[in-house]
Structures are given as structure tokens and as C-alpha cells.
Image (cartoon, rainbow, N blue to C red):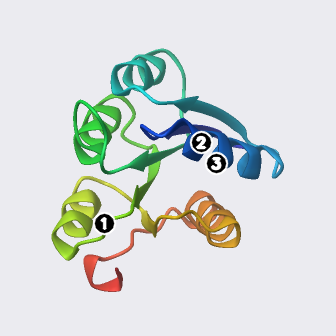
Amino acid sequence: MAEILALDDVRDATVLIGKILSKKGHTVHTFTEEDKAIAHAKEHKIDLAILDIKLEKMSGVEVLAFLKEEQPSMKAIMLTGYPTVETAREAISLGADEYCVKPIDRDELEEKVEKVLKSGGKKSATDV
């Protein structure tokens, strides 16, 4: 199964993502700090990053740019409680494959993770 990095400044959100996706057989590495998540990605292969857009030190979009620089083939799903078309377009232009609105819905997360890992297809900003 996949190596997944989950980054959210709210620990409960990363714990939830970890529980949901671990039950599906994935290995989930959870982080609440951007620098630790980026450092992990520099040392380990990541198949999928699940990133909150609103973080403490930088935006999830900025973290995505760093991660994509390290691992261009990595897939990404962005999470947000504050969806905007501008943020979606920016995330997708930097390589995000999907976009989920918080609070996290288990079925939606499982479905989007499976879709992104299988297809690798890009979602257009008009689909958001």
C-alpha cells in the first residue's frame, strides 16, 4: 500500500487521517509541524501527501511546493475548512490532485485517496 504523509496543525485531524487510512493498509506518517514534515519527505519516499492549507508557520500550498520539489511524482490532497477558488487553483497549479473540505468525512477521504493513488489524474480548478 501507500506511504502517506499527513500534515495539519490540529493533532486530532492527523490522528483521524492516520486511523482511517491505516485501516485501509496504508502507512501514515502524521505531523503537526511543517519543518518536520518537509524533513521527513527529504529522507523518505512519499506516495501521497495530505496537507491542510492553513498551518502555523506557512501555508499548506507552500509546503506542497517544497514537497513537490523533493518528490515531483508525489500525489497530494489539500484539506481546508475555508475553501476558495483561488486557493484551489493555486494548489492544483502546484500539483495537488484533489481537494477536501473539513471536517473530514471518512468515506470522502477514503474515496479520494483511492482515486488519487490509482489514477494519478489531475483535477481541474473548475471541478472544485
The 10 Å Cα crowd at callout 1, few under 14, some 14 to 19, many 20 or more, is few
Q: Nearer the viewer, mark 3 or mark 2?
A: 2
Which residue is at 35% across, 34% downward? Answer: 67
**Amino acid type shown at disc 3:** Ile
From the image, state whether disc 1 or disc 3 is nearer to you: 1
- The numbered mark, 1 or 2, whose residue comes first in the sequence reads 2
Q: Residue 17: image x %, image y %? A: 64, 48
**Which quadrant holds residue 8?**
top left
Kindly check if marks 1 and 3 are in contact, taking CB atoms under 8 A apart as contact: no
Which residue position is annotated with label 2? Answer: 12
Q: Secondary structure at mark 2?
A: helix
Of residues 19 and 125, the one nearer the viewer is 19
Category of crowding for the residue at label 3, using alpha-carbon neighbours closer than 10 angstroms: few (below 14), some (14–19), many (at least 20):
many
Q: Which residue is mark 1?
A: 82
C-alpha separation, residue under disc 3 versus residue under disc 2: 9 Å
Res 12 quadrant in image: top right
Which residue, given by chain and number where applicable, does mark 3 sit on?
17
Q: Which residue lies most toward the bottom here?
A: 126
Please name the amino acid that badge 2 sits on.
Asp
The residue at 48%/15% (across/down) is 43
Pick the front one: 103 or 2: 103
Amino acid carrying label 1: it is Tyr
Pointer 3 and pointer 2: residues touching (CB < 8 Å)?
no
Circle 2: is it few (<14), some (14-19), or many (20+) Cα within 10 Å?
few
Judging from the image, what secondary structure is the residue with disc 1 in?
loop
Q: Is residue 57 left or right of residue 106?
A: left
Q: Position of residue 122 (x, y in %)?
A: 39, 68
Which quadrant is the N terminus positioned in? top right
